[in-house]
């Protein structure tokens, strides 16, 4: 079953790839084998190497329809190479493009894709491949999970956000007017093939936004990963090839370990990945998705750290240290846009992490020591959020 995706495709611009293979789930929904991250050596003879591998799978595709879902921007950059490569391998390939941006992560766009799948006769043996950032992989994954109760899914992430976070873990989602990511389902991709070379065409703002999730992984996992960021700010921002690759691998290890321990978010482990996201998501929808997801996560992390200090859990020096790093990485630590605090709190009350009517927050006791608390009152949340705006006014 896994063999189908066990090859490299020529879709990017570099030959340095990280391939993460996620295998089938067992009855309990756990990943059967390890989430593994491995680096492939650059191919000595790219053309020959690729051709040989593609030839090997040719016999296995049997007219099964593969639909590449991408957005207009990524499609222009990498779509034809991926589609060409798949067609060359004998796949029957269709391409569906969405408009770039968070607004496309909706049920309406999912339905457009369902109509396309129906028109192209994509059956239960169909396969959906996401080529793009987190918006494309969340949406395409949702469609793959629901089309005919689930078809195979694979991801070619093209943003840093997706390389370090969104592409792995199997969470798919669409937004509703009530809140972000409110509708979704777990659906593990059969493979994730990361080409860090794609990052070179990314806008600087999107590179920075992706780094927020990387800082998040550091804060919830290890002092050492935080120091890696602090020591390599310039190389990271310049997307130095070896540093970017190292950064992605380290992130995959952190997220991979958590997903392995709690694939379906039942053990209070995976929730840790939501650090900075409760307030972050509320800000994101509060500003009508005009800020990048990562930018809102940066703001949400500042608020969550301040909340941790207010709760007597965290030393204030950690807030200063994290804020300094975010500033160096070009991420926001103050909210320029206006959001009414009551509206924000109303959105937070809708948070998916709520249990027995109580909100649950991921807070920090120290770098690498996250803790889940359900006893956070509304008033400290209000002040933590308002501090993001208050700083701005001072
Ligand atoms: N499922 C998860 O576990 C998970 C985790 C983190 C984030 N997310 C979701 O991911 C989304 C954010 O993802 P994102 O930041 O990747 O946003 P995105 O997919 O909107 O991509 C950002 C922009 O970059 C462009 N782009 C993508 N790749 C490019 C490339 N290589 N070169 C040039 N331009 C390129 C896109 O067209 C888009 O305009 C949010 O919806 C968030 O909720 C999901
Ligand atoms: Zn996120």
Image (cartoon, rainbow, N blue to C red):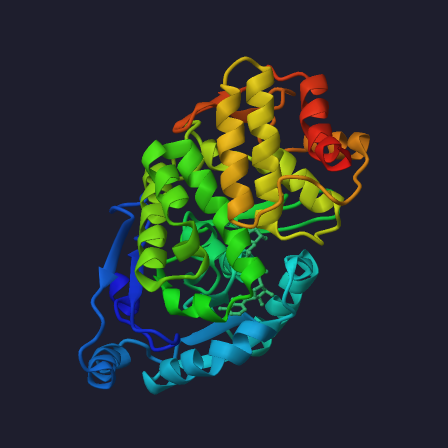
Question: Which one is nearer the viewer's eye here, 350 or 208?
Answer: 208
The picture places residue 155, in percent across and down from the top left corner, at: 42, 62
Give me the residue at 39% from left, 56% from top.
Answer: 235
Residue 185 place in picture, x, y as percent: 52, 47
- Image position of 31 with respect to 67: above or below: above
Q: Is residue 116 above or below residue 355?
A: below
Task: Say which quarter of the image contains residue 369.
Answer: top left
The C terminus sits in image quarter: top right
In the rendered image, the residue lying farthest to the left is 44
Asked if residue 101 shows in the view, the reply is yes
Query: In the figure, residue 281 lies in which quadrant?
Result: top right
The spot of residue 170 in percent (x, y) is: 44, 49
**Ligand 1 location (quadrant):** bottom right
The structure residue drawn at horizontal position 71% and vertical position 19%, both measured from the top left corner, is 378
In the image shown, does 225 or 363 lie closer to the viewer? 225
Relative to 107, is 120 above or below?
Answer: below
Q: Position of 139 compared to 6: left or right?
A: right
User: In this figure, what is the number of numbered marks?
Assistant: 0
Q: Position of 21 compared to 218: left or right?
A: left
Instruction: For the N terminus, give its image quadrant.
Output: bottom left
Q: Residue at point 55% right, 36% down?
A: 323
Viewer-nearest residue: 194 or 22: 194
Q: Is residue 1 visible?
A: no
Q: Is residue 43 above or below residue 132?
A: below
Judge left or right: residue 259 versus residue 160. Answer: left
Name the foreground residue: 275 vs 112. 275
Point 56% across, 65% down: residue: 203
User: Where in the figure is residue 325, as x and y percent of width and height?
Assistant: 49, 41
């Amino acid at each position: 079953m896994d063999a189908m995706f066990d090859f490299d495709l020529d879709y990017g611009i570099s030959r340095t790839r990280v391939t993460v293979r996620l295998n089938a789930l067992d009855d309990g929904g756990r990943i059967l084998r390890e989430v593994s991250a491995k680096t492939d050596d650059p191919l000595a003879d790219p053309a020959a190497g690729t051709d040989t591998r593609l030839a090997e799978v040719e016999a296995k595709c049997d007219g099964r329809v593969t639909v590449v879902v991408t957005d207009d921007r990524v499609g222009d950059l990498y779509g034809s190479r991926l589609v060409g490569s798949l067609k060359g391998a004998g796949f029957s390939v269709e391409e569906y493009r969405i408009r770039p941006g968070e607004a496309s992560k909706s049920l309406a766009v999912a339905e457009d894709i369902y109509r396309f799948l129906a028109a192209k006769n994509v059956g239960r043996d169909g396969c959906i491949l996401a080529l793009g950032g987190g918006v494309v992989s969340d949406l395409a994954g949702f469609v793959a999970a629901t089309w005919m109760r689930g078809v195979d899914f694979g991801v070619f992430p093209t943003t840093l956000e997706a390389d370090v976070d969104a592409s792995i873990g199997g969470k798919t989602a669409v937004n509703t007017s009530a809140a972000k990511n409110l509708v979704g389902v777990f659906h593990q991709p059969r493979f994730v093939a990361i080409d860090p070379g794609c990052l070179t065409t990314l806008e600087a703002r999107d590179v920075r936004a992706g780094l927020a999730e990387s800082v998040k992984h550091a804060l919830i996992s290890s002092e050492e990963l935080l120091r890696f960021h602090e020591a390599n700010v310039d190389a990271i921002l310049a997307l130095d090839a070896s540093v970017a690759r190292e950064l992605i691998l380290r992130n995959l290890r952190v997220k991979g370990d958590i997903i392995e321990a709690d694939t379906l978010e039942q053990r209070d482990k995976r929730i840790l990945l939501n650090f900075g996201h409760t307030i972050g998501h509320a800000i994101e929808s509060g500003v009508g998705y005009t800020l990048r997801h990562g930018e809102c996560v940066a703001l949400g992390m500042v608020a969550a750290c301040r909340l941790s200090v207010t709760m007597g859990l965290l030393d204030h020096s950690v807030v200063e240290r994290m804020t300094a790093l975010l500033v160096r990485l070009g991420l926001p630590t103050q909210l320029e846009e206006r959001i009414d605090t009551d509206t924000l709190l109303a959105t937070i009350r809708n948070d998916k992490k709520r249990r027995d009517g109580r909100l649950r927050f991921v807070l920090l006791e120290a770098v690498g020591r996250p803790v889940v608390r359900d006893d956070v009152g509304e008033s400290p949340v209000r002040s933590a959020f308002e501090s993001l705006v208050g700083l701005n006014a001072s």
